[in-house]
Image: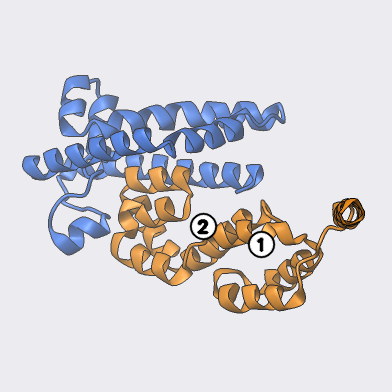
Amino acid sequence: MIYIAHQKIFYSFTFLLTNLYYIPKMDSQKVDMFLMTNAKYFQAKHLNYIRERLQVADDSKWPLLQSADLKDPTTSLIISIFAGSLGIDRFIIGDTGLGVGKLLTCGGLGIWAIVDWFLISDATKAKNMEKLQMFL
Amino acid sequence: MTRNRLYLFLFLGLIAGYSYVLWESYVRIFNHPFTPCIFKNTTGIACPSCGVTRSVLLLMHGGLTSAILMNPLGLVVAAIMTITPLWLLYDVSFKKNTLYNSYKKTEKVLKTPWIAILFFILIAANWAWNIHKGL
């Protein structure tokens, strides 16, 4: 009886030791899955960087990555076309300052609103990258 | 957005804003009905910031009450257009980033839920008033 208890303590101790100093890395399958499902949220030039950073990141980051509030570039483009002159597209992606600017100036006298139809999806992707950068 | 990008953007925006106000103050003499607002041109009803230029012009001629009655947002825009150039000049000449820091801080404050809700209620109320006035 005593012997078994001793062995249990020994095993749990070794388990603790091996796990204390071992930080599990995110396996490449998970990284690939993340990139496959989320590629459209980021600029193509950043994808390689994201892959490299995720492969060396530890596994505890995974739930955080899943909970990152990424915005869809297509949605923001649609919003920009219909409500761009009120600055709502900029508010949605988190550019509050620019949103207020756009709202107060009737979408930058209409010119900024039109320019933003072409810039908004890239701006959304850049904002997503900023959000992801916090976890990398 | 980085500091330099914001400052360049503000600089260009201020130039555009001032030249538009100047041009408008010249054109108003002939009572020329022109609006660059996409929203108003497509839907026919005023947008939340319709009347801001007229409000700024009224303020330039000293009519504070009439400016507020035209569109209270005009005061905000006028304040931004007078303070920002000086602040920008100060930051650029002394190589500081006080304007950038306060921009970031304002953004953060505006993202606080209750302030954001209050802000949107005020904007919506002003919009309703604009439509009612038929700007």
Alpha carbon of mark 1 to alpha carbon of mark 2: how far? 14 Å
Task: Spot the blue chain and give its letter.
Answer: B
Determine which residue is flagged by label 2: A69
Q: Chain of mark 1?
A: A
- Quadrant of the rendered structure where residue B6 is? top right
Q: Nearest the camera: A60 or A78? A: A60
Callout 2: 10 Å neighbours few (<14), some, many (20+)?
Answer: few
Chain of the residue where label 2 is placed in the rendered structure: A
Colour that chain A carries in the picture = orange
Asked if marks 1 and 2 touch (Cβ < 8 Å), the reply is no
Q: Residue B108: give x, y in percent of width and height.
A: 50, 36
**Which amino acid lies under the numbered mark 2 shown in the image of this protein?**
Asp
Query: Amino acid under label 1?
Result: Trp
Residue depth check, mark 1 versus mark 2: number of the one nearer the observer: 1
Q: Is residue A48 above or below residue B68?
A: below
Classify residue A102 as left or right of residue B71.
right
